[in-house]
Every structure is written in C-alpha cells, then in structure tokens.
Amino acid sequence: MGDAVDTTSANGRTLGSQPDIVGKPPVLTVEDFSKSFGARSAVENVSFSLMEHEFVAVLGPSGAGKTTLFRCITGSAKSDAGRIRFGGTEIERLTPRELRQIAVVFQQFNLVRRLTALDNVLAGRLGYLPTWRGVFRRFERADKLRAFECLERVGMLDHALQRADTLSGGQQQRVAIARALAQEPRLIVADEPVASLDPSSAAGVMQLLKDIARDEGVAVICSLHQVGYARTFTDRVIGLARGRVVVDAPTQSLDEAAYDALYGSADLRSNTATTGHSGMPDHHSTVEKDRRAALLLISGEK
Ligand SMILES: Nc1ncnc2c1ncn2[C@@H]1O[C@H](COP(=O)(O)OP(=O)(O)OP(=O)(O)O)[C@@H](O)[C@H]1O
C-alpha cells in the first residue's frame, strides 16, 4: 500500500487518509432530489454524494424527510424530481444484481424470527442464487462459508445456530448487519438502526458500522435521532429540516450553532402542519425533545 494521502470527497470535504479512493467516483450521488406526497413536500432539492469508506449520519427532527430520502435511495419509492445515482447509474435503471449492492438495515431488524441466525444471514445470498436454488434454499458451500464469515465479522459466530427470536435486540441487529454484509454491498442504508436498542448495544452497533465503513470500503448512511451517536461515531453529518439540507459538514467541525440550525430552525407550527399524516408522532413535542437532547449532549461533551 502506498503512502496515505488526504482525499477530498465530491462535496469538497476531506475524508482523511484513504489512499484507495483517490480518483474513484462517488458510490452514491443525489442531485436536486425532491419528493412530495400530494401537495405536501417531503424532501426538496437535496444534493449530496457519498464516497467509499464514508460513514454519514442523517439527522433531523421528526418529519424532516429522512425516511422518504432513504426509501428513494433504496429504490422502494420514486423521486418526483432530480436524480439518484448508484455507481454512476440512476437507481431506476439498476439491474437486480446491482441493486443487491445496496443493503438496508432496519430499526426493527426484520429477521425471520423462527429461523437461525445463519439462515437469516443466508437470506442475504439469495440474490446471488439461480431462481430454482433460491426457491428451495439450496445454497452452495461458498454461500454458507460467506455467511459464517459475515457472522464472525459481527461477533455472532457462536450464535450461528440460535433462533433469531432468542437473541437480544443488539444481537439481532448484528445478525441483520451480517445479512447486509452477505449481500456484498457497496452501500449500507441504515434507517434508525439503534433506535430500539439500549445504550450499550447501540454503541456496539454504531462502532460495528464505523468499522465496516473503514475496513470494507462500504459507504454507510445512517439516520439517527441521537446526536451523541452521530458525534461519536460518524465522519459527516447531513442535517435535514423540513425536507431541506441545512447542515452538511464533517462531524468534528459541527458546533452548537450547527445543531441549532438543524433542530432550532424548524418552524414548529408549519412543521406540525406539514406532518399530519396518520400514524406520525406529535411533531411539536418530538422536535422540541430532539432539540433539547442535542443541546444537552453538546454542552455535556465540551
Ligand atoms: N406515505 C406518506 N403519505 C403522506 N405523507 C407522507 C408519507 N410519508 C411521509 N410523509 C410526509 O413526508 C414528510 C417526511 O416524512 P418522513 O417520514 O420522511 O420524515 P422522517 O424525518 O423520517 O421522520 P421520523 O424521524 O419521524 O421517522 C412528513 O411531512 C410526512 O408527514
């Protein structure tokens, strides 16, 4: 390996010493992306790009548009305007094989509860099997070896044959990350991956995602409600408020004013008015709670 050199991302930020990404195109590019639900604008003119090895947090008050953005990145919802490119190709034009390189980690793990950890991880290989093998779950030896390696990578090898519903929340999320790794991803999209975990398990999962970005060269984009985890583990913060990017900067450069822009800029009345679809939480109180949590964490860590 040659000497480490500082590398600047497409967004003009230094990613640290990552010699192997020099001259490489971004893994993901989001350009002037917008999405509305009827007359309600959820995400507006969002642009950013992600490089290999980057671990990026997406922060923002409830209703800011994080989930909508993630659903469009993974191809499960369509944008109204703008472009999302993965490895240079627009998301809508990706082949199934290319789409497999985008792995998703969910808040509720989404494991098959009655299957073992190993069988859940093998599900990440399904996209690589010919159809008939997939239907009968006839995995090749190489797929099984790969699944074991992924379980080892997340520290869950000893639990390979344990049923998913007998694992703790933190262990289940590790298995879900192993399943994501089994897809051989270039991008991991983690939608509030630690929201259901206790603080110790959450820190372990955040550290694991950080290590994967650093060691495997995967780009990881992760929505969070906890500013502290973003500050401790991620390289860069993209802050959304009312569907717009209000912060996009290296994590270490962010100060109180930046978090204030993110959580304090939300016009609570208009935010509540634009987030009223059924099933959503009380946005006024959630935004205020997020803001207080952000300020507490910032003042506590200085
Ligand atoms: N299926 C839908 N139908 C109508 N409006 C929607 C739908 N999904 C999201 N929205 C609206 O889009 C906006 C963004 O919502 P989104 O769920 O993306 O925010 P979020 O930042 O992920 O919030 P949270 O942190 O609470 O998950 C909100 O105004 C929301 O009410």
Image (cartoon, rainbow, N blue to C red):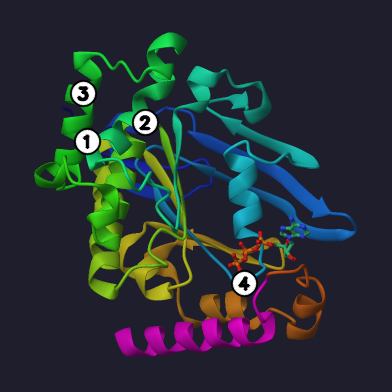
Where residue 238 sits in the image (x, y, percent)? 53, 60
Q: List the residue tagged with mark 2.
A: 124
Q: List the residue tagged with mark 3.
A: 144
The answer to which of 116 and 1 lies nearer the viewer is: 116
Q: Which amino acid type is shown beneath numbered disc 4?
A: Ser
Q: Which amino acid type is shown beneath numbered disc 1?
A: Cys
Where residue 142 sits in the image (x, y, percent)? 21, 16
Figure quadrant of residue 240: bottom right
Q: CA distance from mark 1 to mark 2?
A: 10 Å
Q: Residue at x 18, y 46 (%)?
A: 162
Q: List the residue tagged with mark 4.
A: 62
Secondary structure type for disc 3: helix
Closer to the chain start, of discs 4 and 2, is 4
Q: Is residue 199 left or right of residue 40?
A: left
Residue 72 within the magenta-colored segment of the rendering: no
Q: Is residue 219 left or right of residue 244?
A: left
Check mark 1 vs ligand 1: CB closer than 8 Å? yes or no. no
Among all residues in the image, which is located at the extreme left? 158
Closer to the chain start, of discs 1 and 4, is 4
Depth check, mark 1 against mark 3: the one in front is 3
Circle 4/circle 2 CB separation < 8 Å? no
Q: Residue at x 66, y 66 (%)?
A: 64
Q: CA distance from mark 1 to mark 3?
A: 10 Å
Circle 1/circle 2 CB separation < 8 Å? yes
Ligand 1 visible in quadrant? bottom right
Q: List the residue tagged with mark 1.
A: 150
Q: CA distance from mark 1 to mark 4?
A: 33 Å
Q: CA distance from mark 2 to mark 3?
A: 11 Å
Q: Which amino acid type is shown beneath numbered disc 3?
A: Lys
Q: Residues within 10 Å of mark 2 (few under 14, many from 20)?
A: many
What residue span does the magenta drawing correspond to?
280-301
